[in-house]
Amino acid sequence: MTTLADLEAVALGCVACPLASGRTKVVFSAGNPAASLMLVGEAPGHDEDLVGEPFVGRSGQLLDRLLSEELGLDRTGCYIANVVKCRPPGNRDPVPLEVAACRHFLESQVELVSPKVIVSLGNFASRTLLGVTEGVTSLRGRSYSYGSRVLVPTFHPAYALRGGGVVVAEMRADLVRAKKFLL
Ligand code: URA
């Protein structure tokens, strides 16, 4: 059985798609691999590529604040990963070939961390995990089964930063929805 450490070591040397040539660091995960809550974002941005950790920029600060205020959790109480582990140039959405090359890492992370609840952050992660084409605005507001787990889609914190109070309030409501499945 592979461990998360083995998987991370493979990811750090991965050249399976063209994003490898443009990255500074592979961004594998943050947080606690024993957590019951896993958050899944899209792909590293500029700051994450430099630091090698997901959600370290402004959207990460909002995410940390909402996790603390709604769930009483910091990064030791959840596990965070992205669908794609290397930064797409100019922060564009990952393309299907990149997702196809990278997806097995996320799937293995889900199996090894074995969270009760997965919160998908934004259109891209929500669509990819649920295998649907709808946007997060219509997907959010309810929970889905994801194998034996529960998936709760919510907005991406970068969108919430631009969208203001209403979007942040809806993100809070989604986190409260996720919390009920953690109890
Ligand atoms: N946006 C994401 O989706 N993931 C990160 O790690 C940072 C920004």
Image (cartoon, helix red, strand yellow):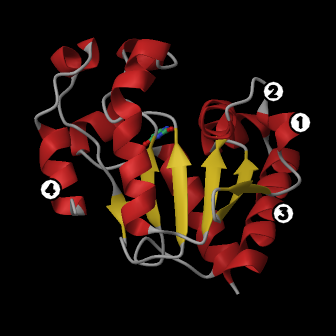
State the CA–CA distance, disc 3 to disc 2: 20 Å
Q: Which residue is mark 3?
A: 173
Q: What is the C-alpha distance between the residues marked 4 and 2?
A: 35 Å
User: Camera-side residue: 46 or 143?
Assistant: 143
Q: Which residue is mark 4?
A: 6
Q: Are marks 4 and 3 in contact (CB under 8 Å)?
A: no
> In this image, 39 relative to 137: left or right?
left
Q: CA distance from mark 3 to mark 1?
A: 15 Å
Up/down of 83 relative to 166, above or below:
above
Q: Which residue is mark 1?
A: 138
Question: Which amino acid type corresponds to the residue marked 2 in the rendered image?
Answer: Glu
Q: Nearer the viewer, mark 4 or mark 2?
A: 4
The image shows residue 69 at horizontal and vertical percentages of 67, 75
Q: Secondary structure at mark 1?
A: helix
Q: Earlier in the sequence, mark 3 or mark 2?
A: 2
Q: Which label's residue is closer to the chain start, 4 or 1?
A: 4
Task: Tell which tag, 4 or 3, sits nearer the viewer.
Answer: 4
Residue 142 lies in quadrant: bottom right
Read off the residue under disc 2: 134
Near mark 4 (Cα within 10 A), the count class, few <14, some 14-19 or many ≥20, is few
- Provide residue 82's location: percent of width, then percent of height: 44, 42
* Residues tagged 3 and 2 counted as in contact (Cβ below 8 A): no
Q: Is residue 44 visible?
A: no
> Dot 1: within a 10 Å radius of its alpha carbon, few (fewer than 14), some, or many (20 or more) residues?
few
Disc 3 and disc 1 in contact, CB within 8 angstroms: no
Figure check: 135 above or below 65? above
